Image: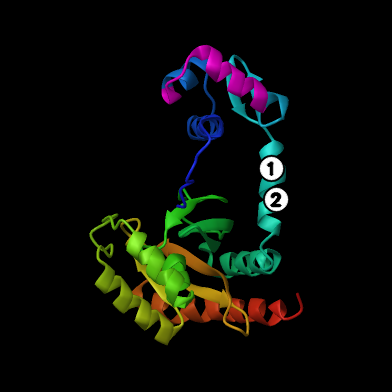
Amino acid sequence: MTEAKNPVQAVQRSLGIVDILRDGDGATVTEIADEIGVTKGTAHCHLATLEENGYVIKEDGEYVLGLRFLDLAHYAKDRIDVSDLATTEVDKLAEETGELALFTVEEDGQGVCLHTADGEEAVQTEIYVGYRNELYHTAVGKAMLAFMPPEKRDRIIEETEFEAKTSRTITDEATLREELEQIREDGAAYNHGETIQGLVGAGAPIRDQDGTLYGAISIIGPERRLDEERLKNEIPEMIQQAVNIIEINLTSL
């Protein structure tokens, strides 16, 4: 993530409060003051300013995030030209496969989920709209890494702090680059239980005729249902059909 050269402390504190309220589903003034290391009076000043502008509200002695963030979220999502097209196709994929389908974009070197759709048998995960994840261990992340401009890919990989999420997670640059080369040849990326043990997936990038990368879509499910045969053949074919429809419609945007 890009770091500010001259961060404004007051802004950082307010943003820190927003994160605390999100992560804890609300908090008291005392809890927030202790968390960010300021006096209760300072914490209250930040909260009062956020409350005055509709970003937080007070309920039963605790502060929680306000619905003003919904307006910002809709605006941010609408900036993505392909969002509506991808949403429609992801919904179809979830219905056809019965599994969890996602639309993800890259921002600041991370994957950001912009839409999820649950099929009838979809697994329940922590993934939600706005959920962020590293690119190196997910199908959508690797799909985007493989097809983004080389300079950007190199920078992201060099800044990646590899961590073994499971025993199958790629944990070194050389192995990742080798897999990305294979993804460019195949047009599809895979997650073989690299993020959550027993949960697998396939993904493919969304690009226009000039090769500009818009994001990626994927299907995720348990290994017992998405066995190797289905994961490598049926699922990628369905994803690619959805991607083709999106990419054809991109020309009219």
Local secondary structure at mark 2: helix
The image quarter in which residue 143 lies: bottom left
Residue in the image at 48% along x and 30% along y = 24
In the drawing, what numbered circle is on residue 70?
A: 1
Q: For this view, does 66 lie left or right of residue 42?
A: right
Q: For this view, does 90 lie left or right of residue 219?
A: right
Counting from the top left corner in percent of width and height, residue 186 is at 42, 85
Residue in the image at 28% along x and 65% along y = 170
- Stretch in magenta: 35-50
Asked if the residue at tag 1 contacts the one at tag 2, i.e. Cβ–Cβ closer than 8 Å, the answer is yes
Counting from the top left corner in percent of width and height, residue 37 is at 42, 21
Mark 1 closeness class: few <14, some 14–19, many ≥20 residues within 10 Å:
few
Residue in the image at 58% along x and 77% along y = 212
Mark 2 closeness class: few <14, some 14–19, many ≥20 residues within 10 Å:
few
In this view, the residue in front, 82 or 93, is 82
The image quarter in which residue 191 lies: bottom left
The quarter of the image holding the C terminus is bottom right
Counting from the top left corner in percent of width and height, residue 79 is at 69, 59
For disc 2, the marked residue is 74
The image quarter in which residue 181 lies: bottom left
| Magenta residue check for 49 | yes
Residue in the image at 42% along x and 83% along y = 184
Distance (Cα) linking label 2 and label 1: 6 Å
Local secondary structure at mark 1: helix
Q: Amino acid at mark 1?
A: Leu
Question: Is residue 207 shown to the viewer in this render?
Answer: yes
In this view, the residue in front, 13 or 142, is 13
Question: Is residue 200 shown to the viewer in this render?
Answer: no
**What secondary structure do most residues of the magenta stretch adopt?**
helix
